[in-house]
Image (cartoon, rainbow, N blue to C red):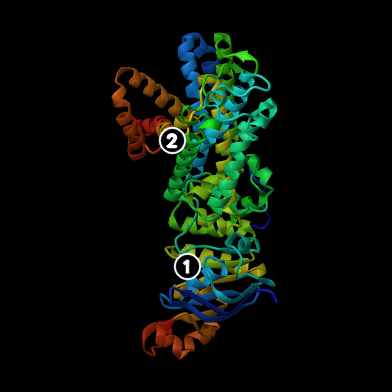
């Protein structure tokens, strides 16, 4: 420890950063090739449709990776935001399917309503609906987050609270049969902004939109993780109280990651609807919310690409296993959640590094 | 009135009075050591000043009343502290730790960019605390003494004007202690420094003034020599009146 006569000139950042930049660019490029060239060439229409669904889950996973992996918030209730985005999109598509002035089919079927409920009306506007798919979840997350983080609710309490919200959301939706379709949800969606969803070409277009959205969200998460904010978020995750003594309010830091993750879940919900053709309470409740997290745990929650890969891998394994032994999946899924957390906390994304270490 | 002024400070935990009517005056530029047996309320005193625990009475620093403000608001008024067990962000590098400490006043949107250059205050602090060579190491891998220096470095870039150091040289080697002591002396030129310390040799060499606490109260105050000569201090430390060298 020596005194300095004059402040030293700030040395440039190590050259290694440039190399990481290259690696990231190469990673994004190969991801784009895999999603836009390889997958459409290798998979038939049915499998590509499944992949589109998995990629929606991957978008949620990117957000969870940010909030949980980097921010330490175990978001066990992302179904809330996924559902908000999904219902916002489905409401618009149902109204568009019905045509101007008509009630959506299920409302006519149940016959409880003569006119469209007031809160359905704005969703007839495509711009409003599109903005709402992302803005609505973010707004709800902002309000919830204010309450939760200012009161310093965290850890297991945060996880339980967010899970309870997912349960409440599903129960609420089931209870509003006349206006939300109840247990059935909003189903049988035919068109997507003028494109017929029964046409395989249009379904392929939906796949490409989802793949593009995933890459975009990965880029957003990448920038957030490498930024000063990302460093601060990790600091808050590891020593929330310490951060206060440096003049920061950790509640604000966590809030940003929570709101961004909610926006990603909302976007995923919005894209899920045209890809799969349905949104229902069973897709937004406790069980799917936990499943979103399982993929993230398997892939490696703190890495950029791990959560997305894990989500796709788990969803794919689920389909593959359920096709053969339907009853075994639940047990397998439980194992998938427990094993990585106990034996491989860094998830699959940490395997290459561990292997390299083991070889040395 | 610059410097730190504490008046009739009381901290009560579930009926247990941890700090019991403490008055303290630490003028700007002072290096004040606070000593006392375990449980005397020294760390609680710092906790109260920094807003971590609820307290009654009054605490002013540079004309700002501190009590009742939130921890991060107090930190923004230029009050910085370290902890008994070095509290650094172990998963982040030394550079990242310092950069975060330098940053609360940055515009929120500017946080969304990656750090382009090492800020000059951070580079300066790296040199001052001698951690330039381990700049890109994870803080968790540092030796104990290095972590404590990193914490001091964080206070420097934070631009804290009141430094509250809780046992900063615990576990350091003799040469590291000397270096830390010298640094504290230099820092005090335009700051106010308050140190909790058990190491009497360190205290004798680097304290300008000393406050002795016992059972939540201030027992004695003055220069090192004055405090050493105080029979009440000898009483609480050793239970009898020994020779001065034994005490301090």
- The chain carrying label 1 is B
Q: Secondary structure at mark 2?
A: helix
- Up the image or down, B90 lies above or below A108; here it is below
Residue B14 in the image, given as x and y percentages of width and height: 43, 73
Residue B88 visible in the displayed image: yes
Q: Quadrant of residue A286?
A: top left
| Residue found 44% across the figure and 81% down from its top | B215
| Residue found 61% across the figure and 22% down from its top | A93
Badge number at residue B167:
1
For the residues labelled 2 and 1, the Cα–Cα distance comes to 42 Å
Contact, CB < 8 Å: mark 2 with mark 1? no
Label 2 in the same subunit as label 1: no
Q: Which residue is mark 2?
A: A293
- Up the image or down, A302 lies above or below A235; here it is above
Q: Nearer the viewer, mark 2 or mark 1?
A: 2
Badge number at residue A325:
none
Q: Along the line of sight, which residue is nearer the eye, B61 or A221?
A: A221
Q: Quadrant of residue A349?
A: top left
| Residue found 45% across the figure and 90% down from its top | B231
Quadrant location, the C terminus of chain B: bottom left
Residue B134 visible in the displayed image: no
At label 2, counting other C-alpha atoms closer than 10 Å, the crowd grade (few under 14, some 14-19, many 20 or more) is many
| Residue found 61% across the figure and 62% down from its top | B75
Residue A282 in the image, given as x and y percentages of width and height: 44, 31
Residue A80 in the image, given as x and y percentages of width and height: 51, 37
Q: Secondary structure at mark 1?
A: loop
Q: Along the line of sight, which residue is nearer the eye, B42 or A10?
A: B42
At label 1, counting other C-alpha atoms closer than 10 Å, the crowd grade (few under 14, some 14-19, many 20 or more) is many
């Amino acid at each position: 420890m020596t005194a300095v006569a004059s402040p030293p000139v700030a040395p440039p950042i190590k050259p290694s950063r440039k190399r990481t930049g290259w690696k990231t660019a190469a990673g994004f490029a190969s991801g784009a090739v895999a999603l836009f060239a390889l997958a459409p060439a290798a998979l038939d229409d049915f499998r590509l449709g499944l992949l589109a669904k998995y990629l929606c889950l991957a978008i949620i996973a990117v957000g969870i990776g940010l909030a949980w992996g980097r921010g330490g918030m175990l978001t066990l209730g992302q179904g809330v935001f996924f559902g908000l985005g999904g219902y916002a999109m489905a409401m618009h598509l149902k109204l568009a399917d019905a045509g101007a002035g008509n009630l959506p089919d299920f409302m006519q079927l149940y016959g409880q309503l003569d006119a469209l409920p007031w809160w359905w009306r704005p969703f007839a506007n495509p711009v409003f609906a599109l903005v709402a798919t992302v803005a609505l979840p973010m707004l709800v997350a902002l309000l919830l987050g204010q309450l939760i983080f200012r009161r310093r609710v965290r850890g297991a309490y945060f996880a339980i609270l967010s899970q309870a919200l997912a349960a409440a959301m599903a129960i609420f939706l089931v209870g509003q049969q006349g206006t939300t379709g109840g247990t059935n949800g909003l189903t049988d969606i035919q068109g997507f902004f003028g494109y017929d969803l029964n046409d395989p070409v249009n379904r392929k277009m939906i796949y490409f939109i989802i793949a593009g959205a995933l890459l975009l969200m990965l880029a957003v998460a990448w920038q957030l993780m490498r930024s000063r904010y990302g460093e601060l978020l990790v600091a808050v995750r590891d020593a929330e109280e310490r951060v206060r003594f440096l003049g920061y309010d950790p509640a604000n830091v966590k809030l940003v990651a929570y709101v961004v993750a909610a926006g990603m879940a909302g976007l995923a919900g919005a894209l899920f609807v045209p890809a799969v053709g349905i949104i229902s309470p069973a897709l937004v409740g406790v069980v799917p919310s936990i499943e979103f997290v399982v993929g993230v745990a398997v892939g490696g929650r703190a890495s950029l690409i791990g959560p997305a890969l894990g989500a796709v891998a788990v969803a794919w394994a689920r389909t593959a296993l359920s096709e053969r032994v339907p009853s075994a999946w639940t047990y397998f899924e439980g194992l998938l959640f427990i094993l990585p957390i106990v034996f491989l906390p860094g998830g699959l994304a940490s395997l290459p590094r561990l292997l390299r270490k083991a070889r040395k | 009135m610059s410097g730190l002024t504490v008046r009739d400070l009381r901290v009560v935990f579930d009926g247990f009075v941890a700090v019991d009517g403490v008055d303290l005056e630490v003028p700007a530029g002072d290096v004040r050591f606070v000593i006392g047996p375990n449980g005397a309320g020294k760390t609680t005193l710092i906790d109260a000043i920094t807003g971590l625990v609820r307290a009654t009475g009054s605490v002013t620093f540079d004309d700002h009343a501190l009590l009742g403000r939130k921890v991060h608001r107090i930190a923004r008024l230029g009050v910085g502290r370290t902890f008994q067990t070095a509290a650094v962000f172990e998963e982040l590098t030394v550079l990242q730790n310092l950069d975060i400490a330098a940053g609360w006043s940055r515009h929120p949107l500017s946080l969304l960019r990656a750090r382009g250059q090492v800020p000059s205050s951070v580079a300066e602090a790296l040199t001052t605390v001698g951690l330039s060579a381990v700049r890109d190491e994870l803080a968790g891998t540092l030796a104990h003494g290095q972590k404590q220096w990193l914490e001091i470095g964080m206070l420097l870039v934070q631009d804290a004007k009141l430094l509250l150091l809780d046992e900063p040289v615990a576990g350091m080697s003799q040469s590291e202690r000397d270096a830390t002591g010298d640094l504290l002396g230099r820092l005090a030129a335009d700051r106010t420094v308050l140190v909790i310390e058990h190491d009497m040799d360190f205290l004798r060499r680097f304290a300008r003034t000393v406050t002795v606490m016992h059972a939540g109260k201030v027992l004695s105050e003055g220069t090192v020599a004055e405090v050493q000569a105080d029979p009440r201090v000898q009483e609480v430390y050793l239970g009898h009146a020994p020779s001065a060298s034994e005490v301090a």
